[in-house]
Amino acid sequence: MPSRIRILFVCMGNICRSPLAESIFAHLARERGVEERFEVASAGTSAYHAGDPPDPRSVATAHARGVTVRGTSRQLNARDLHDFDYVIVMDAENRLAVDRLRATDEGSARIHRLREWDPAKSGLDVPDPYFGGGRGFDDVHDIVERSCAALLEDLLTEEGREE
């Protein structure tokens, strides 16, 4: 069996967007029957929420759509740039933080913004719903879901891993 593709989703606090992306991507891969081909995780550029569970609003929004979001927040570290094939960030600020980390310890991970795969993109940032209302979590779920679906399809096609 070929080696697994390792993907790390990154946002600021690792309680809203990145655990949602991790969970949605894993859910979509499971639905396609290709979950064993991927290892997914998430992290935050900040340690502010380290050890905290995902935001209950993000969990509830995903649950209503059949996706389970679990986990514990952790901060991104230099080792991640070596351990993962892809580091997928949610916005420009996250990208800058990852680029600063890469400047101290290069690593081989390919760094992208998630919305590079969004077929309906109206910008490259996945907005942070933390301070917004419930609708913001629905909007972010929609963005993350369609972006993760396109990312999964692209990885399966690119790697020639589709059965």
Image (tube, rainbow, N blue to C red):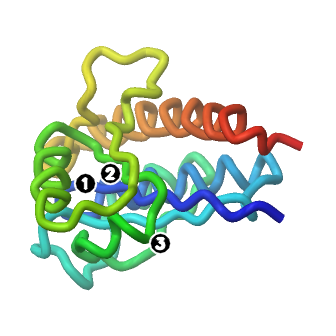
Secondary structure, mark 2, is helix
Count residues near mark 3 (Cα–Cα under 10 Å), then give few for <14, some for 14-19, many for 20+: some
Residue 135 horizontal side relative to residue 41, left or right: left
Q: Earlier in the sequence, mark 2 or mark 1?
A: 1
Q: CA distance from mark 2 to mark 3?
A: 12 Å
Q: Earlier in the sequence, mark 2 or mark 3?
A: 2
Q: Do the residues bearing badges 2 and 3 touch, measured as CB atoms within 8 Å?
A: no
Q: Residue at x 30, y 47 (%)?
A: 89
Name the residue carrying label 1.
Answer: 11
Q: Residue at x 13, y 75 (%)?
A: 47
Residue 79 horizontal side relative to residue 96, left or right: right
Q: CA distance from mark 3 to mark 1?
A: 16 Å
Count residues near mark 2 (Cα–Cα under 10 Å), then give few for <14, some for 14-19, many for 20+: many
Residue 135 image-quadrant placement: top left
Q: Position of residue 33 (x, y in %)?
A: 82, 53
Residue 151 image-quadrant placement: top right
Name the residue carrying label 2.
Answer: 17
> Does 136 appear above or below 57?
above
Residue 34 horizontal side relative to residue 139, left or right: right
- Mark sitting on residue 51: none
Q: Amino acid at mark 3?
A: Arg
Q: Residue at x 77, y 53 (%)?
A: 34
Secondary structure, mark 1, is strand
Where does the C terminus fall, quadrant-wise?
A: top right
Q: Earlier in the sequence, mark 3 or mark 1?
A: 1
Q: Do the residues bearing badges 2 and 1 touch, measured as CB atoms within 8 Å?
A: yes
Q: Nearer the viewer, mark 2 or mark 1?
A: 1
Name the residue carrying label 3.
Answer: 70
Q: Amino acid at mark 1?
A: Cys
Q: Amino acid at mark 2?
A: Arg
